[in-house]
Structures are given as structure tokens and as C-alpha cells.
């Protein structure tokens, strides 16, 4: 097996070591390998390809880290066709939460989430993906069908 050197904050390394101990892993390498496989497999779900999807992406970062907020604004504008909604909120005394609602393809959502994860100084990035084309012919299907246009219909 190839040995890889990875830089990470001491706090994250300590959390990985604690996680390995608490969950019966043989060491941090096993945890990192599994996490890597999971990350790479997240958007490789064939059931979601070629479908209209909705995603909710939540980003948490330190209030003092203005570069993250600037990057979130840049990403929102760069992907304005994908970002259906965006919400910023303060959490506690020192954190900010950025919430994005996305509508688009698996590839576009994957690219967006990847760019957020690559943003330095984010504390957490969480997301969920839901197909919106599976709701039949009711109001949700109509809304999904119109998601690419200027407006949307309500039944």
C-alpha cells in the first residue's frame, strides 16, 4: 500500500484518533481510507443521474473568518443558475451558517459542494440531495418542471 503524507490541523487529527479508538478502527489510516471512499462515492449514485434534483447545503464557519463568507458570495454568483435560495444566519456568538438550496443535476450539485468543501476555514459542510422529478403530476412536479424558468406555479 502506498504511504501518503497529509497536512491537517492538530485538532482534526486528535478527533480522528479518538474516533478510531471509540469505533474499533485499527488506526487513523483506516479511518481516512474509509472517509475517502465514502466521500468519493457520495455523488456516484447512478439512481440520481439524469434526474432533476434539489439539494440543501449547510456550511458553518467562524464569524471572524471573512474570507469564507466572501467565497460563499462568490460561489452563489458563480452558480446563480443552480442556487435557488441562499440564507445566512449567525449561530451562537462566533459562528455563521450559510444555507444553500440548489436545484439542478447531480454533476452541478457535486461541483458546487466540492467547491465549498475545498474552501479553507469552513468548519462543517453538510448536505442532502432529493430527486424532485419523482413526485408525479402534482404541484411539486409542476414546480420541479418550472424550476429552470423565471417563476414557479402553486397548485
Image (cartoon, rainbow, N blue to C red):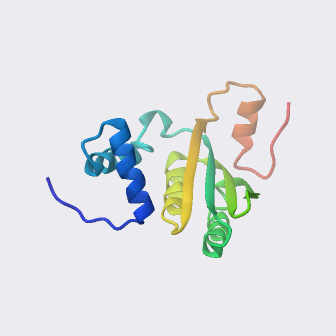
Residue in the picture at 45% in, 44% down: 43
Tell whether 98 sits left or right of 23.
right
Depth order, front residue of 87/149: 87
In which quadrant of the rendered view does residue 132 lie? top right
In which quadrant of the rendered view does residue 46 lie? top left
Position of residue 92 measured from the top left corner of the image (x, y, whole percent): 73, 57
Position of residue 107 measured from the top left corner of the image (x, y, whole percent): 49, 51
Residue in the picture at 66% in, 64% down: 76
Residue 109 visible here: yes
Position of residue 28 measured from the top left corner of the image (x, y, whole percent): 29, 50
Count the numbered circles shown. 0
Give above or below for 152 relative to 97: above
Task: Look at the image and tell me in which quarter the C terminus lies.
Answer: top right
Residue in the picture at 67% in, 53% down: 100
Residue in the picture at 83% in, 39% down: 153
Residue 40 visible here: no
Amino acid at each position: 500500500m502506498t504511504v501518503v503524507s497529509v497536512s491537517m490541523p492538530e485538532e482534526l487529527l486528535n478527533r480522528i484518533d479518538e474516533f478510531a479508538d471509540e469505533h474499533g478502527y485499527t488506526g487513523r489510516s483506516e479511518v481516512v481510507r474509509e472517509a475517502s471512499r465514502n466521500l468519493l462515492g457520495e455523488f456516484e449514485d447512478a439512481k440520481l443521474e439524469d434526474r432533476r434534483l434539489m439539494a440543501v447545503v449547510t456550511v458553518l464557519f467562524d464569524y471572524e473568518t471573512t474570507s469564507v463568507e466572501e467565497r460563499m458570495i462568490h460561489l452563489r454568483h458563480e452558480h446563480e443558475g443552480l442556487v435557488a435560495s441562499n440564507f445566512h444566519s449567525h449561530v451562537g456568538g462566533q459562528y455563521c451558517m450559510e444555507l444553500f438550496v440548489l436545484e439542478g443535476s447531480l454533476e452541478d450539485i457535486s461541483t458546487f459542494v466540492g467547491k465549498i468543501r475545498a474552501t479553507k476555514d469552513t468548519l462543517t459542510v453538510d448536505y442532502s440531495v432529493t430527486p424532485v422529478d419523482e413526485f408525479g403530476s402534482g404541484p411539486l412536479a409542476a414546480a420541479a418542471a418550472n424550476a429552470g424558468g423565471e417563476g414557479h406555479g402553486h397548485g
